[in-house]
Image: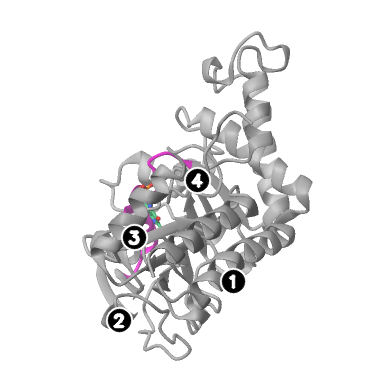
Amino acid sequence: KYGRTFNFSAGPAMMPEPVLEEIRDEMMNYRGSGMCVMEMSHRSKVFQQIADEAQADLRKLMNIPDNYKVLFIQGGGTLQFAMVAMNLMKNGKACYVETGAWSKKAIAEAKKYGEVQVVASSADKNFSYIPDCSDLDIPEDADYVYICENETINGTTWNKLPNTKGHILVSDQSSMFLSRPCNVADYGLIWAGVQKNVGPAGMAVVIIREDLIRDDLDPKTPIYMKYKTHADNDSMYNTPNCWAIYCCGKVFKYLLSIGGLEEMEKRNIAKAQVIYDFLDSSKLFKGAVVPQDRSLMNIPFVTGDKELDAAVVAASKEAGFDNLKGHKSVGGLRASVYNAMPIEGAQALVDFLTKFEAEHK
Ligand code: PMP
């Protein structure tokens, strides 16, 4: 249908087909409003309802407690590296766990705003595992402990959150957001760029405990960079990314309709299992991550031979797949199988890899 490809991109990535179809049907005239959502005033009643429903549906989906604010902020994930540090470093000190490319970026940015202590790292083995964080050395006056809960490039995921010893936990959930149930109360702040597991690029969702929203920031902090600005104005201080809010809202509704995050997790486990089972039995391909910390979303794997890796990538394109080339820091291939990738995509990929392996014995 539609000639669509199985797109294994790390993001922006596939969206659920029923959602794209609904968006298509509403494109020229959104529910009798006479206009497309792209053309609508963000102050109009009709858009306000779209934004309100998006927030309410996300709250339902994640069971977000009442003492947390949900914010829709432009600037994607990278802006959050800075915003987290600017807003939460009250004592000017924070602990970061270094598990890969995206936590490194967060660390580099946070260093501009205060003292950063890297309390655990998996750099010694090219970020192929999640370090033991059951007994970290966390200073009493640390403002928060920061993790990247799913490292998109390295393909690791946290299955057990760190022991923060009573400190606030901040998590970058960009590449795993809504992929499994999440107990929001375990966190002080969760943020996620939406372009991987939810909707179009250009927005981050921030879920923040109300008591962490401060007004006593450096007076030079740009208005846009204060969580308080967005919290006080229900994410409408300025013109928000209306289109992303609309599309994400549809994905929230879609996830509720299929049975919520429990059902999504079941499907994601089944889907990733198809690929991991293949990798574990293959003599040619090898997964890049230790089994207990493997991501359900991003699956990097290698042949161990750069030329052969390049040959698989080229053959995969020819076979009609897209975006399977691994990041240069890991090499090989990476299959990103976010929520919207159907299990048929994982199966088709494994069929292709099986055939490739048979032809390259
Ligand atoms: N964090 C993670 C885990 C990511 O995967 C990415 C993007 N790949 C980012 C942050 C940065 O997001 P953005 O491109 O929206 O700035």
The local secondary structure at tag 3 comes to helix
**Marks 2 and 1, how far apart in space?**
28 Å
How many angstroms separate mark 3 from mark 2 (CA)? 27 Å
**Amino acid type for the residue under numbered disc 3:** Ala
Q: Amino acid at mark 2?
A: Lys
- Toward the left, the furthest residue is 112
Residue at x 46% of width, y 65% of height: 358
Look at mark 1 in the image and give the residue it sits on.
186
Which of disc 4 and disc 1 is earlier in sequence? 1
Q: Where residue 353 sits: x, y (%)?
A: 47, 60
| Numbered disc in front, either 4 or 2 | 2
Report if residue 78 lies within the magenta region: yes
Disc number placed over residue 125 in the picture, else none = 2
In the image, is residue 108 above or below residue 291?
Answer: above
Disc 4 to disc 2, how far (Cα)? Answer: 29 Å
Which callout, 4 or 2, points at the residue further toward the start of the chain? Answer: 2
- Image-quadrant location for residue 125: bottom left
- Could you tell which of marks 2 and 1 lies nearer the N-terminus? 2
Mark 2 vs mark 1: in front: 2
Task: Tell me if label 1 and label 3 are in contact, CB under 8 Å.
Answer: no
> How many C-alpha atoms fall within 10 Å of the one at disc 1: few (<14), some, or many (≥20)?
few
Disc 4 residue type? Val
Where does the C terminus fall, quadrant-wise?
bottom left
* Left or right of 28 in this view: 208: left
Left or right relative to 230: residue 216:
left
**Crowding at mark 2 (Cα within 10 Å: few <14, some 14-19, many 20+):** few
**Chain part drawn in magenta:** 73-91
Where residue 42 sits: x, y (%)? 55, 23
**In the rendered image, which residue does mark 3 sit on?**
85
Say if 298 sits above or below 317 in the image: below
Give the number of the mark in front: 3 or 4: 4
- Secondary element at image label 2: helix
